[in-house]
Image (spheres, rainbow, N blue to C red):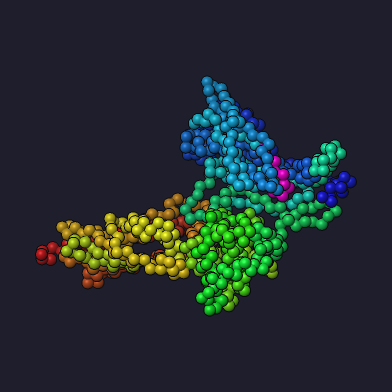
Amino acid sequence: MKWVSKLLLLTVFCSASVLHAQQSKENLKFGQIKPSDFEPTVYDVDSSASAVYLFNNGKSSYVGNNDGFFSVVYEQHTRIRFMNKNGFGAAIVTIPVYISKDYQMKLISLEASTFNMENGRVVETKLDKSALYTEVNHDETIYKFTFPNVKEGSIAEFQIKLNLPSYYFMPDWDFQKSYPVLYSSYEVNVPYFFNYAIVKKGIQDYVLDTAIDFRQQYYIHDKRNGGSVAGNTIAVSTQAAKHIWAMKNVPAFHNQPYITSADNYVSGIEFQLSEIRMPEEDVEKVAQSWNKESEQLLNNPDFGLELKYDNTWLKDDIQTATANATNNLEKVQGIFTFVRNNYSCINHTSRLLSQPLKKVVQTRNGNVADINMVLTAMLKQAGLEAYPVILSTRYHEKVLRDYPVMHKFNYVITRVVVDDVNYYLDASRKYVGFNQLPEYCYNGFAREINDKDPILLRFDADSLKEYGMDMVMVKPDFTNHTLSLSVNKTFGNIESQNARGVIMSTSLDAYMQQLQKQYNIPVQLTDVHADNLKELDEPLKLQYTAALNLDGDKDIIYLNPMLSDRIVENPFTAQQRIYPIEMPYCPNQTYIFEMEVPEGYVVDELPKSARVQLNGNDGSFEYIIVNKNNHIQMRCRLLMNKANFSPEDYSTLRDFYAFIVQKESEQIVLKKNKTFPKP
C-alpha cells in the first residue's frame, strides 16, 4: 500500500485527552474461583434462572500484522453458574470461525474449565483438547465443546482469542443471552485510521458507556515479498480510541408471540466501518451512499453484473414463456409463471448469486437470489423495465432506513413496471401467485438496485391485508340423529399459499385431516372439493360437508356456533411486555353461521351480540347473533387495521383478545320442547 512508506516518516504528535474509565471489578483472571462464589442459591436478577452468566467480557483490538497492514484480535472471557439441570444447555459452547479464500480467521487459543466444591475446596476439571471438535459448513468452521464434569451448582468458564486477518470487520457483541447476565462488558480499541458507525440495539441501560483517547504504537511487518522481519518492520505511533460499554443484571431474552427476529431486540452493539483515514491520502468512504452501493452491486459478478450483458441465450425460454401474450402485462405474467414453475429454490436466504446465471438456467435450480435474478434478466431481455430488490425477511433482522449495512439483507425479489404500475414478484416459491409475496418479506425497508436512483421501498405487515370467509350452514337430520353441515371456506392470499403448500406436497386428504382437528367437536369431513387449487393468482376455496351427532334423547343440547377457526387461547398471556407486537399481517376474517333449530327443541339461551373497538380504529371485533322463528343466524368478524403495536398498546391488545376468546367460547343452548308431541 502506498501509505506504508509514508508511515516510516510519520510521527503523530497529539495531545491525547484521556478520560479515565471505571475499571470493572468483575474483570477477573481465569481460574480465580473462591468457595464463596458457590454460596448463592439464587440471584436477584432472576431467582428462577436455571443458569446465570456471572460475567461475559469481550475485547477487540487492532494490531499490526505480517501483511503490511492491520488485523483485529478478539478476546472473550465468560463465566457461567449452573443452578440446576435445566440450565445444562449453557454448557455447550460454539465458536464460529469464518474461512474463505480471502479471509482466514484463526483460533489462537482456547482455555475452558469446570469448577466444583468437593470436601470444602474448589476442584478444577480442565477441558481435554481432544473433546474439542469441529463442524465445517461451506466457509464456516464451528468449534464446539461441552464443559466437563458439570453438576448442579457448578461454575464453568472459558477464554478464547481469535485473529481476524482483515481490518475491515469489528466483531459485534451481545450483552443479553438466553440466561440472565450479572455483568457484561465490551472493550474496543481502534486507531485513528479507522472510523466506525456504531449501532446500539435493545432496551437495557448501560452502566458504562465511555470513550478514551490515548496514544498507541503499532508494529506492522511485511513478509509478503520474503523480506526479513527486522528489515520490514514499521513502528506506527498514532492516536487511538478505547470504547468501553457495560451492562449489569441483564435479564434473559425470551422469544415472545408475534415478534420478528430476536436480533432486532437482544441488547447488543454492532459496528460498520465507515471511513479509512490514511496519512496524506484522501478519506476512503467505506460505508457508501446507496447510490455508490447500488453501483457496486450492479458491477458485482455475484449480483448484478450479468444483468448488463446481452443475454441472448435466454431468448428461447422467453419465447416459450410469452407465446400466448398479447401485451406487456401478459408477457410479465408468462415469464414469471415460467420461472416459478420450472425452477427449484434450494435456499431461501441469500442476497448473492451462488453461481453464474447461465448455470442456474442449465440446472433449473439455485438460491432465491439466483432464481429471481434469472427472472429479472428474462424480463429485461424481453424489453421490460425490471430491477432486483434486496430486503431482509422477518426472521432475519430489520434493515436500517438509509444506512447500507449489507449483511442485514438476505433476500432478493424483482420489481417490474408495466404502464406505470409496479409489480413485485418472487418466483422462488412454488405456491405464490403473481404480484404476491410470502408473508416473511413484509419486514420494513427494502432497496431497489438500479443505476440511477436506488429507490427506498417499504413492505410493512400493516399493509398486508388478509381476507378470509367461512360460511357454515347447519340443518337437522332427525332420521339419522345428526346435524348436517355444509361449509364454504375462502382463504386469504397468505392462507392460500400455506394451504397449497401442504396440499401439493402431501394431498388434499392430508390437509383435510389437519382441518378436521380445528373443530370443537368430533366430526368427519366429507364431499371435499377444492377450487383454484392450481390457479395461484386466485384465493383457494374449499367446499365440504360434515355430520354432527345429535342425541335425540337429550333434553338439553349445547352447541358452539364457532365450529372451527375459533381463537381458543389468548396469544398474549404475560402481564407486561417490553417488546413491540409484530403480527405477520392484518386479518379480516368473517365467519357466518346459519342453523335451523331441530324440530322438538327451542332456543333456551343464546350468546349476546357484541361489538368491540381496539384503540379507536386499530381493529374491531363483532359478534352478531339472532334467532328468528327458530332460525339462528350468526356473523363473527375480526378486523385488524394494523399489524404492528408498541409495548404501550399491549394491555389493551391483551384485553381485546381475551374478550374474543371468551366470546367465541360461548354456546347456544337448545332445550327440548316438552309440549312437542313425540313421534
Q: Is residue 486 left or right of residue 444?
A: left
**Where does the image place residue 117, in percent across and percent down from the top left?**
54, 25
Residue 142 lies, with reference to residue 359, above or below; the image says above
User: Depth check: 578 or 187 in front?
Assistant: 187
Q: Does the magenta stretch include residue 591?
A: no
- Picture quarter with the C terminus: bottom left
The single residue placed furthest to the right in the displayed view is: 9
Residue 160 lies, with reference to residue 380, above or below; the image says above
Tell me what residue is drawn at x 47 percent, y 37 percent: 86
User: Depth check: 492 or 67 in front?
Assistant: 67
Q: In this view, does 168 lie to the left or right of 612?
A: right
User: Depth check: 396 or 650 in front?
Assistant: 396
- Is residue 587 at all visible to an observer of this figure? no
- How many numbered circles are shown? 0
Q: Is residue 298 left or right of residue 51?
A: right
Tell me what residue is drawn at x 53 percent, y 76 percent: 325
Q: Main secondary structure of the magenta part?
A: loop
Q: Is residue 2 left or right of residue 77?
A: right
**Where does the image place residue 23, in percent across and percent down from the top left?**
69, 38
- Is residue 72 at all visible to an observer of this figure? yes
Q: What residue range appears in magenta?
A: 161-171
Tell me what residue is drawn at x 25 percent, y 72 percent: 628
**Where does the image place residue 369, in percent across and percent down from the top left?**
59, 59
Question: Image quadrant of residue 55?
Answer: top right
